[in-house]
Image (cartoon, rainbow, N blue to C red):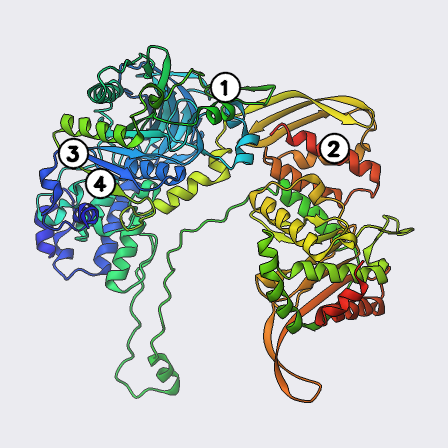
């Protein structure tokens, strides 16, 4: 097949009878997968393995519903994790910087791969704007100096992020074609209070879909227009090569990259150190207890934990057991639930105690 | 081959006479030793200030977001040192030197300046240094055999030292699978590749002694002792293995398991096992499965096992009890909250179905479905995971026949179910027939439960399952 020819010719150094010798400048590829982790892994793979000196790459991809946070962001600060879990929306952390975005099939992702020296974000965004205007001249789209693309001077339709390595770099951006704005705004609103951190914050913006501006536009049409403009600017054929991110022969090592992106250690564990300082409002019997909670979370794990319970609410020995067990534990509702319910087995068998313990547990996990 | 190499690798100094012979291991070792001699001559290196290089786009300052190394760590050229961020771009800074980190000039969240020192590295002066441009490729060694360094579209990462080694041994880097960071090709990869070619296992360190071949005995009539010496002694070579032990703290859920299991072992366990003929039950389930599916529920064997257990517990309530800490009081629990051991990513989780004594088999199946989907999504709630009074563990779905389950405090009994096997058995008439046999292994708290009680409970449970129609008589 064509794509195997491409890669194999590099590895085996067979006479270059195919695309390579004619292609100067550029290569356009599109993922057949809608899995955010697989697609992010393809970006990693190209960044780590391809020599972009002679040839730049444009990678086109779309994902089924997912929230993607930037490299140095705090997912608790950026989105409603509870809602994500309920709706089965995936959470991914990408390797580039920048803010949080919501992806679904109505959003297209474009990644421009170049050598580190040729890294130039403005050029790429101008290319996109040029393609959009060529498609629909009446569209009022422009690039801002924050590397956003605005529609009608007020609505953000594209956000940008970049990753620079030793010799290569990539700039990727989104483009809102027909995404679900309702889900977008609800998942990107964090319900968690009292978080303090130096993680990169996202800058919220009003968004609009291109589809709303012109219902004749679809993701496919937009992808094609951008590919066409890229082809023109890089003097290559307007041809999009499809790639399958699970093809280990084409992309050796890709499944490891995909797995790594899905690990808890990467998605949550890479969160910069933060602290939680908040109040639990526990409805107990006929009253409501206000319990101050202070926690320091590092690498996604509870480093320090302080719960201001009323005196003797829990037997003192038990309180210190609780704190000791929470320390070092993942800041994750599932982990805390299983941890605390399992611990209950070795607590005194007292119904009152059990209900207090469960109540505390349920309230704690609401913070996560 | 050797002479060709001498001409093309003029930069490497070695004594010509050694290379007149055919390439063999000893020659390779010699060259290792030579290199080692050069590098070991340097005892302490110089401190170099590694400055933050230009990021591009006119950026002058960045924020340090993560350090990948700390003071005292040794780094190799191309290792990642830190991650910095500037205006939505995340940049990985890699080392230009091999050496030891002596000082970090910034802490996390500090602003770092382009052109100013980032880290101080004590370098090994004899080792290679990356050029200012941090370009991977070294100048091509002229011949076609060495254009592996310029494979178009496929970058091969390797330090100059490794490239030299590959070239000396006429190895194409493209044929080697790198095991280092970013799939970098390491010296070990070259050595392993060579070992495969020559069919020998090379020593991992160049310092290894060259083992002399077994000595041949002289042509003299040998005494029995001498004859023994004629048997060549196999030369043992250390096998290259670069795995490292990894220590992690016990935290979170694992910590809780440690506590629970330690408490469990304080309970004096006794075991009781038996086999159950599930032939009739298998048939019954086959008939009922489609009915359940029509109602949107997956029907496994567990609901039957659990209902039968509950019926048994009605007759032997001591198995559904709890002994207090001081072993002063036994509490007979009214509800049969039967726990089901579940294997999840975290480990062993035991959610329970509440009040099985008032549930139909179908009700139990519905609850099990709910618990299973929550369990695999990691979303089980506190009420699902607390209040259990008796547990069944269907380890047979993974495998095994007999087991020795551990009682989960504060319960007093547990049953482990092995896998269902098709085995030959004798019928009442003495004929052999195909039977679906499952083994059950019970464990119980011997402080309040005796063997007879366990046996009778097990027999009753078994009778319900072997003859499912009998369950109908006692269903409430």
Mark 4 and mark 2: span between their CA atoms? 55 Å
Distance (Cα) linking label 4 and label 3? 10 Å
Q: Earlier along the polypeptide chain: callout 1 or callout 2?
A: 1
Q: Position of residue A232 (x, y in %)?
A: 14, 27
- Above-or-below relation of B37 to B61: below
Which x, y percent locates residue A131?
21, 22
Q: Are marks 3 and 2 in contact (CB under 8 Å)?
A: no
Q: Secondary structure at mark 4?
A: strand
Say which of marks 3 and 2 sits in front: 3
Classed neighbour count for the residue bearing mark 1: other residues with Cα under 10 Å, few (<14), some (14–19), many (≥20): some
Q: Dot 4 corresponds to which residue? A: A241
Snapshot quadrant of residue B378? top right
Tell me, yes or no, whether dots 3 and 2 are on the same chain. Answer: yes
Tell me the mark number nearer the camera, choosing from 1 and 4: 4
Q: Residues within 10 Å of mark 4 (few under 14, many from 20)?
A: some
Q: Is residue B449 left or right of residue A182?
A: right
Q: Which mark is residue A238?
A: 3
């Amino acid at each position: 097949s064509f794509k195997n020819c491409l890669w194999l010719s590099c590895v085996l150094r067979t006479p270059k009878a195919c695309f390579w010798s004619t292609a100067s400048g550029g290569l356009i590829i599109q993922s057949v997968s809608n899995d955010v982790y697989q697609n992010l892994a393809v970006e990693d793979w190209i960044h780590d393995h391809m020599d972009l000196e002679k040839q730049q790459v444009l990678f086109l991809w779309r994902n089924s519903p997912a929230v993607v946070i930037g490299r140095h962001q705090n997912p608790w600060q950026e989105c409603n994790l509870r809602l994500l879990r309920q709706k089965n929306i995936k959470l991914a952390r990408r390797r580039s910087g920048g803010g949080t975005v919501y992806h679904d099939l109505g959003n297209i992702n474009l990644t421009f791969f170049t050598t580190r020296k040729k890294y130039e974000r403005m050029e790429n965004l101008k290319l996109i704007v040029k393609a959009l205007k060529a498609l629909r001249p009446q569209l009022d789209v422009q690039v801002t100096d924050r590397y956003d693309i605005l529609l009608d001077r007020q609505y953000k339709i594209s956000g940008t992020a970049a990753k620079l390595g030793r010799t290569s770099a990539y700039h990727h951006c989104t483009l809102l074609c027909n995404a679900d704005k309702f889900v977008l705004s609800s998942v990107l609103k964090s319900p968690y209070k009292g978080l303090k951190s130096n993680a990169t914050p996202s800058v919220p913006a009003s968004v609009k879909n291109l589809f709303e501006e012109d219902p004749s536009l679809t993701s496919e049409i937009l992808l094609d227009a951008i590919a066409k403009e890229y082809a023109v600017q890089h003097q290559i054929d307007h041809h999009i090569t499809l790639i399958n991110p699970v093809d280990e022969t084409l992309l050796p090592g890709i499944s490891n990259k995909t797995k790594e992106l899905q690990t808890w250690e990467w998605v949550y564990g890479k969160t910069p150190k933060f602290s939680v300082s908040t109040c639990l409002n526990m409805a107990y019997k006929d009253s409501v207890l206000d319990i101050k909670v202070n926690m320091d979370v590092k690498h996604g794990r509870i480093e320090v934990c302080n719960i201001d319970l009323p005196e003797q609410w829990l037997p003192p020995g038990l309180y210190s057991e609780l704190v000791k067990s929470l320390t070092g534990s993942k800041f994750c509702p599932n982990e805390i639930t299983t941890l605390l319910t399992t611990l209950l087995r070795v607590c005194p068998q007292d119904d009152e105690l059990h209900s207090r313990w469960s109540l505390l547990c349920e309230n704690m996990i609401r913070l996560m | 081959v050797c002479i060709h190499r001498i001409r093309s690798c003029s930069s490497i100094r070695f004594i010509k006479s050694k290379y007149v012979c055919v390439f063999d291991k000893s020659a390779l070792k010699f060259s290792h030793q030579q290199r080692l001699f050069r590098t070991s001559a340097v005892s302490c290196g110089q401190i170099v200030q590694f400055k933050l290089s230009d990021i591009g786009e006119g950026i002058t300052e960045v924020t340090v977001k993560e350090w990948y190394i700390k003071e005292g760590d040794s780094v190799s050229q191309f290792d990642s040192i830190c991650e910095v961020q500037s205006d939505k771009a995340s940049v990985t800074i890699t080392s230009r030197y091999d050496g030891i980190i002596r000082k970090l000039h910034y802490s996390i969240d500090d602003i770092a300046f382009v052109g100013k020192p980032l880290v101080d590295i004590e370098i090994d002066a004899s080792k290679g240094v990356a050029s200012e441009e941090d370009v991977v490729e070294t100048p091509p060694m002229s011949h076609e055999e060495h254009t592996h360094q310029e494979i178009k579209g496929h970058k091969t990462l390797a330090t100059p030292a490794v490239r030299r080694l590959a070239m000396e041994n006429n190895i194409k880097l493209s044929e080697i699978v790198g095991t280092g960071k970013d799939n970098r090709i390491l010296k070990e990869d070259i050595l392993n590749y060579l070992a495969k070619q020559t069919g020998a296992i090379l020593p991992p360190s160049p310092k290894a002694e060259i083992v002399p071949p077994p000595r041949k005995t002289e042509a003299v009539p040998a005494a029995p002792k001498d004859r023994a010496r004629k048997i060549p002694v196999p030369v043992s070579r250390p096998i290259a293995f670069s795995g490292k032990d990894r220590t992690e703290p016990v935290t979170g859920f694992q910590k809780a398991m440690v506590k629970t299991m330690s408490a469990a072992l304080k309970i004096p366990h006794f075991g009781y096992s038996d086999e159950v003929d599930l032939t009739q039950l298998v048939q019954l389930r086959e008939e009922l499965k489609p009915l359940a599916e029509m109602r949107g529920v997956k029907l496994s064997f567990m609901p039957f096992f659990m209902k039968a257990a509950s019926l048994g517990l009605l007759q032997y309530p001591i198995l559904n009890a709890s002994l207090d800490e001081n072993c002063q009081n036994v509490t007979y629990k009214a509800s049969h909250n039967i726990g089901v051991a579940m294997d999840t990513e975290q480990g062993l989780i035991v959610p329970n179905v509440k009040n099985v004594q008032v549930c139909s088999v179908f009700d139990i199946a519905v609850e099990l479905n709910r618990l299973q989907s929550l369990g695999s999504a990691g979303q089980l709630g506190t009420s699902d995971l607390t209040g259990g009074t008796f547990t069944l563990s269907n380890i047979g779905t993974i495998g095994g026949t007999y087991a020795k389950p551990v009682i989960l405090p504060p319960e007093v009994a547990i049953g482990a179910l092995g896998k269902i096997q098709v085995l030959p058995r004798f019928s009442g008439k003495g004929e052999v027939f195909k039977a679906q046999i499952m083994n059950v292994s019970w464990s119980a708290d011997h402080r309040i439960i005796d063997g007879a009680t366990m046996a009778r409970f097990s027999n009753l449970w078994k009778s319900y399952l072997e003859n499912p129609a009998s369950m109908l008589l006692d269903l409430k």
